[in-house]
Image (cartoon, coloured by chain):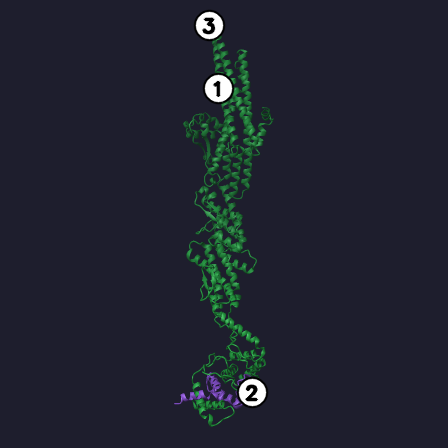
Chain colours: A purple, B green
């Protein structure tokens, strides 16, 4: 049975979502799709997971991030 | 990485992550920009995972984690999903995705653990309360970042396991794979990093300072025993091949080379094990399952090395046993260890022994078939010494029992020795080459080959058969040569006839002719003259019809003489036996013959003396006419003296005759009959020599010439002396008597012629004659009494000593001499 590319992508996403649920990562579908897209582009999963980890923190950490942002301001 | 599409994606991701409820607006714009920038920086920082991108192992580890945390159903579900995913999207970088998800989920469940990515801050508490996940986080975090947060109460087992693993890792300074590698080095005799050969304890060991748990230490020590054994065996081999190359002999070299062959198998095994040990071993606490491939732990090593240890132990035992041995002794020692029930050991020993014994068997074969000793290193059990031709048989070759291997019985060794000796004997002494056919026949009969290596260790039976056949044929050939070509029997007969006085007429003539010569002092006799007389005697008797070759060997020999010796004491005959018969008639044996000859000659002389005396003394008419015309007194005296003389003569004659009869018939003839039988039945030269020695020995014993009979021998010679003195005395007397008679007759005639004028002379003569005769006869009877007494004493002495002799045949002598027990009764009456 021939499936279209979109269908395949949808099924893939579905499966990946189920896996991620099983592993209790706490990601939702949209985020997961973005992550998959990024991985497809060849980004290493390690820094990606670091990003996710960092940016999933509560907003009380905006201060250090602003410190960062201030240091990175050109 | 910096293409716009990626950047856009990142931006969107960041936005989504920052505001989970949906896109928010301005308040987070700045921070979102900053965040985006931060994210981009992170992504471009080239952080890469520290694990090899192996999808399967990752899947396994995830499954295990799920199973261990008590959600085995989830594990199965995950496996299912994964397979579906692989089916659906083969192009997707599943590993990366899984890694991502895994790390995120790990991160969620272990917020307190060590920083995975080196970020400067850590979340202080679980980040997002509302989760769609089914499980609840128990939140029991305790300090000391070792323990896991327990999700289910049933995780105690996992906790305990991890506790144990960590303790184990603490205790272990050295990893197991390093130990395995070191043990493998030790098994080849090389010192490893931790396991070294300790000379003081003579074993492989790890230093005490090393922190290794006790069981590991003990197992390592046990495995290193193999290394110790290997060292020993290899030391022996290298010593044998390098140091003592020219000393160890062919058997030793064969042994070393067969040990080396066994070691090749061992090296192969070690190589395989070494290659296996390069694969990683999962330690007790690690999660990665390792591949499904082989890995080597100390226990697996122990199983693999069990059989080689047995074999190496066997080899080390043999090396110990063989130590300083060489040649046949080494083969015998190894053979004694081959008697073992274990079929593995038997097969091993069989292989070894076949190679070790092949030089020996080869040597035996060549010795038995050709009589050559190819023994450069003195390993064979037959030694040869360079000797003269006549002692070749007796002393040329000997068995060296220290080199005799235990699977060759002493009887077989004797046969082997005799066969080779016979070949050499034939070759050297008899100059005969007929034995070559005999060897060839023997080989053909047995079916063995004459090539090298035809016989091996297991073929002791074949060897024995070959030796027996060869021995039989060669012995027969040797006997043929000795009897036919060298006429051994004829020579023996000749010796018996001449040296043992068997040829009676010859001896009588010889004595008659040579007798007067021999009465002279010894130093005035010339042997040339005697030789001439010998020839005369030979020609005068039946001996002249004997073979010239035999007669040529008969010679006169004068022994060494001191002062005062008469010819009788130094005269002897000699028979010259040449090679090869002088193996039988050695110098020692000829001396024995000489001794016997002297004895017999003396006996003959005594007999001759007595018979000569009888001619004078016998009671015939002549003697009765002596003093027939004299007065009664003189005649009576004469007759009584004469009678007493005759009686004494009779006694002596009785003794001498019986003694001679005993010697001639009981001793010589009987011994000869036995010897003849022995000669006919002997199959080889050893038997013949034994028979001949027995013959001589029995003659010596029976004729009182042995060592045990020396005292009685002396008594016998004293007797002989008495007899001879008696003869000379009697001769003198009769000379006197005849002279007296002659003078009397002369005076009688004179008196008849000149009557009256010489009457007074006659008268005076008669009175003088009476007086003279009275004196004379008185003296004569006195002397006769003395001789008689001495003779009787000596005879009693002799007869009393006779029963004390060992040999049973001397009882017959006693029986003959004392048939009526006259002497024993007389002696008991005394």
Confirm or deny contact between disc 3 and disc 2 (CB under 8 A).
no
Element carrying mark 3:
loop
- Frontmost of labels 1 and 3 is 1
Q: Which residue is mark 1?
A: B732
Chain label for disc 1 = B
Tell me the number on the disc at residue B757.
Answer: 3
The residue closer to the viewer here, B484 or B463, is B463
Tell me, yes or no, whether dots 1 and 2 are on the same chain: yes
The residue closer to the viewer here, B615 or B769, is B769
Tell me if residue B67 comes above or below residue B723 in the rendering.
below
Query: Where residue B525 sits: x, y (%)?
Result: 42, 28
Sequence-first tag of 1 and 2: 2
Q: Which residue is mark 2?
A: B132
Sequence-first tag of 1 and 3: 1
Query: Where residue B694 sits: x, y (%)?
Result: 53, 38
Query: Where residue B244 sits: x, y (%)?
Result: 42, 55
Residue B815 seen anywhere in this rendered image of the structure: yes
Tell me the number on the disc at residue B404.
Answer: none
Chain label for disc 2 = B
């Amino acid at each position: 049975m021939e499936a279209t590319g979109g269908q395949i992508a949808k099924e893939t996403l579905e499966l990946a979502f189920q896996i991620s649920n099983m592993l209790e990562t706490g990601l939702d579908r949209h985020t997961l799709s973005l992550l998959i897209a990024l991985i497809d582009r060849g980004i290493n999963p390690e820094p990606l997971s670091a990003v996710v980890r960092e940016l999933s923190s509560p907003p009380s950490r905006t201060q250090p991030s602003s410190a960062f942002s201030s240091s990175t301001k050109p | 990485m910096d293409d716009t599409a990626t950047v856009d994606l990142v931006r969107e991701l960041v936005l989504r992550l920052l505001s989970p409820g949906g896109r928010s607006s301005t308040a987070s714009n700045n921070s979102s920009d900053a965040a985006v920038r931060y994210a981009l920086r992170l992504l471009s920082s080239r952080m890469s995972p520290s694990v090899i991108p192996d999808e399967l192992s990752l899947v396994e580890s995830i499954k295990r984690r799920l199973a261990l945390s008590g959600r085995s159903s989830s594990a199965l579900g995950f496996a299912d999903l994964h397979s579906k995913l692989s089916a659906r999207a083969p192009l997707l970088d599943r590993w990366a995705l899984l890694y991502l998800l895994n790390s995120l989920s790990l991160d969620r469940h272990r917020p307190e653990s060590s920083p995975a990515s080196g970020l400067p801050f850590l979340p202080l508490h679980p980040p997002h309360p509302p989760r769609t996940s089914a499980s609840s986080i128990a939140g029991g975090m305790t300090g000391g970042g070792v323990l896991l947060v327990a999700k289910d109460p049933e995780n105690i087992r996992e906790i305990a396991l991890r506790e144990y693993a960590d303790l184990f890792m603490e205790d272990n300074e050295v990893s197991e794979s390093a130990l395995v590698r070191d043990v493998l080095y030790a098994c080849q005799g090389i010192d490893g990093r931790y396991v070294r050969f300790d000379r003081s304890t003579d074993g492989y060991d790890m230093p005490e300072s090393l922190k290794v748990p006790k069981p590991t230490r003990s197992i390592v020590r046990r495995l290193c025993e193999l290394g110790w054994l290997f060292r020993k065996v290899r030391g022996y081999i290298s010593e044998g091949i390098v140091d003592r190359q020219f000393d160890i002999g062919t058997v030793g070299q064969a042994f070393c080379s067969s040990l080396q062959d066994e070691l090749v198998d061992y090296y192969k095994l070690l190589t395989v094990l070494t290659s296996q040990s390069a694969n990683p071993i999962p330690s007790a606490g690690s999660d990665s399952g390792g591949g499904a491939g082989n890995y080597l732990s100390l226990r697996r090593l122990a199983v693999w090395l069990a059989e080689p240890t047995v074999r190496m132990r066997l080899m080390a035992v043999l090396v110990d046993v063989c130590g300083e041995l060489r040649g046949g002794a080494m083969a015998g020692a190894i053979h004694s260890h081959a008697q073992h029930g274990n079929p593995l050991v038997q097969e091993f020993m069989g292989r070894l022994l076949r190679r070790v014994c092949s030089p020996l068997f080869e040597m035996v074969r060549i010795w038995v078939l050709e009589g050559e000793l190819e023994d450069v290193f003195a390993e064979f059990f037959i030694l040869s010494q360079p000797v003269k031709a006549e002692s070749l048989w007796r002393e040329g070759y000997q068995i060296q029992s220290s080199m005799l291997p235990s699977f060759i019985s002493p009887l077989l060794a004797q046969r082997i020795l005799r066969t080779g000796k016979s070949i050499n004997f034939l070759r050297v002494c008899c100059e005969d080459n007929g034995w070559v056919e005999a060897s060839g026949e023997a080989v053909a009969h047995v079916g063995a080959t004459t090539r090298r290596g035809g016989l091996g260790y297991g073929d002791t039976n074949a060897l024995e058969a070959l030796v027996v056949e060869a021995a039989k044929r060669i012995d027969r050939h040797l006997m043929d040569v000795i009897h036919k070509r060298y006429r051994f029997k004829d020579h023996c007969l000749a010796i018996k006839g001449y040296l043992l006085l068997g040829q009676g007429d010859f001896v009588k003539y010889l004595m008659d002719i040579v007798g007067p010569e021999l009465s002279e002092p010894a130093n005035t006799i010339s042997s040339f003259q005697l030789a001439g007389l010998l020839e005369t005697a030979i020609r005068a008797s039946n001996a002249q019809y004997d073979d010239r070759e035999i007669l040529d060997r008969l010679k006169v020999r004068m022994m060494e003489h001191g002062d005062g010796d008469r010819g009788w004491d130094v005269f002897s005959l000699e028979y010259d036996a040449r090679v090869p018969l002088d193996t039988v008639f050695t110098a020692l044996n000829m001396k024995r013959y000489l001794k016997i000859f002297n004895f017999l000659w003396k006996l003959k002389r005594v007999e001759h003396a007595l018979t000569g005396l009888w001619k004078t003394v016998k009671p015939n008419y002549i003697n009765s006419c002596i003093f027939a015309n004299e007065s009664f007194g003189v005649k009576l005296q004469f007759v009584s003296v004469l009678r007493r003389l005759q009686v004494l003569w009779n006694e002596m004659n009785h003794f001498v005759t019986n003694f001679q009869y005993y010697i001639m018939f009981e001793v010589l003839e009987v011994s000869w009959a036995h010897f003849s039988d022995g000669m006919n039945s002997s199959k080889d030269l050893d038997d013949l020599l034994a028979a001949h020695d027995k013959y001589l020995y029995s003659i010596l014993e029976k004729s009182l010439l042995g060592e045990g009979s020396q005292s009685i021998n002396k008594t016998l010679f004293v007797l002989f002396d008495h007899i001879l003195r008696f003869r000379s005395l009697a001769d003198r007397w009769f000379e006197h008597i005849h002279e007296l008679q002659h003078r009397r007759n002369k005076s009688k005639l004179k008196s008849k012629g000149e009557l009256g004028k010489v009457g007074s002379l006659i008268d005076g003569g008669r009175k003088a004659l009476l007086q003279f005769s009275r004196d004379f006869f008185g003296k004569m009877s006195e002397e006769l009494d003395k001789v008689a007494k001495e003779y009787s004493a000596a005879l009693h002495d002799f007869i009393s000593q006779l029963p004390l002799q060992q040999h049973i045949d001397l009882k017959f002598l006693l029986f003959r001499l004392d048939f009526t027990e006259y002497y024993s009764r007389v002696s008991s009456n005394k």
